Amino acid sequence: MVCPHLECLAMNPLEIIVPTVAALGVPAWGAFHPRSQLFGTTVSSAGNACALTFDDGPNPRVTSKLLALLEKYRVPATFFVLGKYVKEYPQLAKEIRAANHAIGNHTYGHPSLLFLTRRQIRDELSRCEDAVFTATGQGTTIVRPPFGFRGPQFHSAVREMGLSKIVMWSVSGRDWKPQPAARVSRRLRKARNGDIVLLHDGDHHAANADRSHMLQALEYSIPRWQDSGLQFLKIG
Ligand SMILES: [Zn+2]
């Protein structure tokens, strides 16, 4: 069965996964599944609280609105940014940092890392790192691989870069394309303390992607989560 958790895919995940799984055989689950530890340790639990994570930004159409929403409910969050967008919109990365959220490395251009060499992966990670440092004056310590894909060479590259945690997820909003907000809210309903929730403020294909469905779903979900006792933390 194809893993249901592959994310950040603007196309039908089956288009990529089916041939890749067929080619790789047994290690495929270990390379794709967000909770797999086959090639090295990853983080997919937030301990006693819930961690909201936002991938593929910053996005000039969304990120500032998202920051205002998080501020309204005093929720800390973690942003896995793309270096190419940080370079284009350094002010947004600065705003994320100024609001005391965590920033993680999501590579420079969002390639699939599965078939890249260790050196190519290091290059992607360090170009993102450079962009974040230039924009905010601080580097990152955490990383999330695009599409959740990782193999042994990814873990080696991460170690060489000195990044301390590979952060995956346990609940997904599956919000990578426009859709009714209620659909995203329904998926978020199962989040509990301990979960890492995957959402997207950006789109790796386009800098100005529409993520209003995600914002509306969060506006609906956050007060309900708080009423039911969820606590929030950032990962860093
Ligand atoms: Zn992504």
Image (cartoon, rainbow, N blue to C red):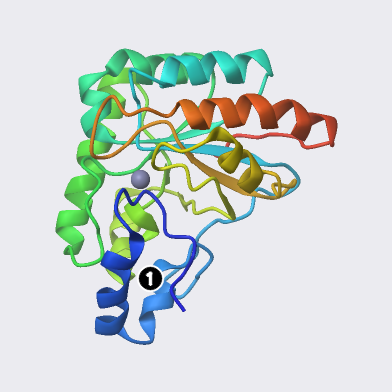
Q: Residues within 10 Å of mark 1 (few under 14, many from 20)?
A: many
Residue at the disc numbered 1: 31
What residue do we see at 74% from left, 47% from top? 192
Q: Quadrant of ligand 1?
A: top left
Tag 1 secondary structure? helix
Given the current orientation, which residue lies at the most extreme front position?
Answer: 180
When the figure is inspected, residue 138 is found, relative to residue 172, above or below; the finding is: above
Dot 1 beta carbon under 8 Å from ligand 1: no
Image location of residue 112, percent across then percent down? 24, 57
Q: Is residue 92 found left or right of 180 in the rendered image?
A: left
Which amino acid type is shown beneath numbered disc 1?
A: Ala
What residue do we see at 50% from left, 60% from top? 42
Q: How many marks?
A: 1
When the figure is inspected, residue 55 is found, relative to residue 90, above or below; the finding is: below
When the figure is inspected, residue 88 is found, relative to residue 213, above or below; the finding is: above
In the picture, residue 140 is in which quadrant?
Answer: top left
Image location of residue 86, percent across then percent down? 27, 26
Q: Nearer the viewer, residue 38 or 7?
A: 7
Q: Is residue 78 found left or right of 46 in the rendered image?
A: left
